[in-house]
Image (cartoon, rainbow, N blue to C red):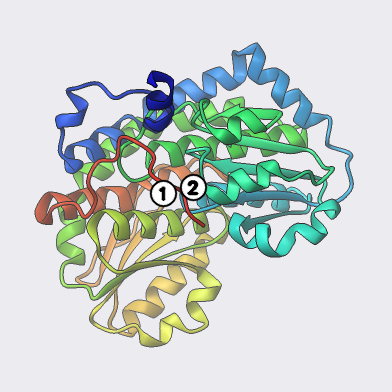
Amino acid sequence: MKDNEADASRWIGGVKPADDVRTLSMTAIFEKECREQPEILATLLRSYAEQEAIRQELHAVQALRQSPGPILFLGMGASLCSSITGTMLLQSSGRSAFFVDAGEWLHYGLPVWDDVAASVLVTTSGESAELVELCKKDPHKPVALICNNEQSMCWRLAKLRLPILAGPEYGNATKTYTNATAACIILASEFLGRSWQADGRQVLSCYSRALDRVFDLRRELREFCAGAANIELVGRGPCYGSALMGALCIREMAAHRSAGHTGAGFRHGPLLDVNESHVSIIFALGQAADLGVKLAQACNARGGKVVLVSTEEHTPTPKLLPVKIEAVPEPWESLTSTLVPQALTLAMIEEGGANLTPRFEYGAMHE
């Protein structure tokens, strides 16, 4: 009977939460988990560089380098956002790669799975129904799992496994997004035979400072965005993942209408309904940064307000709030840029309360 009870109690991350954590408000938990990101990112980078068990899994990835066909990243929600960054690194380096919604692939992509060189399944919980089903399939191609729960069904089913090492997360995806994204970058780098350690150290050298600076601006961000009918986030390349993740954070935690777009996608439709009630958060970062600045100008010309996230200095106006962040090697800006919507979300829930309550156990996972 006791064993059955233990099986029924599926703690987040496979770890029973401490009693003092269970008394915290959702707002306190969200801020706590956001501020843990530099520390847990450092843990992941150190572990992926030094731990023999993880290095062996990465060597197995390197062995797939000559396999024909594209590399496929599969995920849902925040995990899909993390997948985008690994995909963009491979594509920009000349290797065919794609990110795909795991649910769509499960129901429509299986007939062509044999055409894929290798698949990377990204799941924080390891219990998402779609990812569990994909782990049960046998595509006759290598499958790697990136997961934060070593007690999960996906972890038990997978053969090549990489841990997210973010610890339990009881609110919206923050530190798990950060570490899963870093793991996708590392896996893609290893597949390409490219060193990633120096870039990782460069990110760590400024990440904590960037978090503190951006979070100190959170009330200014909230006041600038006050009254917006909706908030749309726009990015290209790795920052497309930031845009989707930022929108997911705002919607889930603050219950405010928000959506993520590519820069090109935003110009083909959504730009047409920009007016005085509209706020865009535009990530003008990476090799397409200039296009982000031009899009901000186009939004302002239509009366919309813009939070412009870039590594350059821009003059603030009543309709433009520049947020300068330190430059990091591409594609690592997908980590630092996401701090801006996280900070805005914290300010929104500090003022109006959180839409979610803390979750300490996994519920039923449905497709």
Name the residue: 34% across, 31% down. 208
- Please name the amino acid that badge 1 sits on: Ser
Is the C-beta separation of discs 1 and 2 under 8 Å? yes
Crowding near the residue tagged with mark 2, few <14, some 14–19, many ≥20 C-alpha atoms within 10 Å: many
Taking 140 as reference, is 27 left or right? left
Report the residue marked by disc 2. Answer: 334
Name the residue: 64% across, 36% down. 145
- Place residue 309 in its image quadrant: bottom left
Report the residue marked by disc 1. Answer: 337
Where is residue 16 shown, x and y percent of the image? 33, 23
Q: How many marks?
A: 2
Where is residue 335 shown, x and y percent of the image? 45, 43
Q: Relative to 336, does residue 156 appear above or below in the rendering?
A: above
Q: In the image shown, does 225 or 180 lie closer to the viewer?
A: 180
Name the residue: 29% across, 24% down. 17
Circle on res. 271? none
Q: CA distance from mark 1 to mark 2?
A: 6 Å
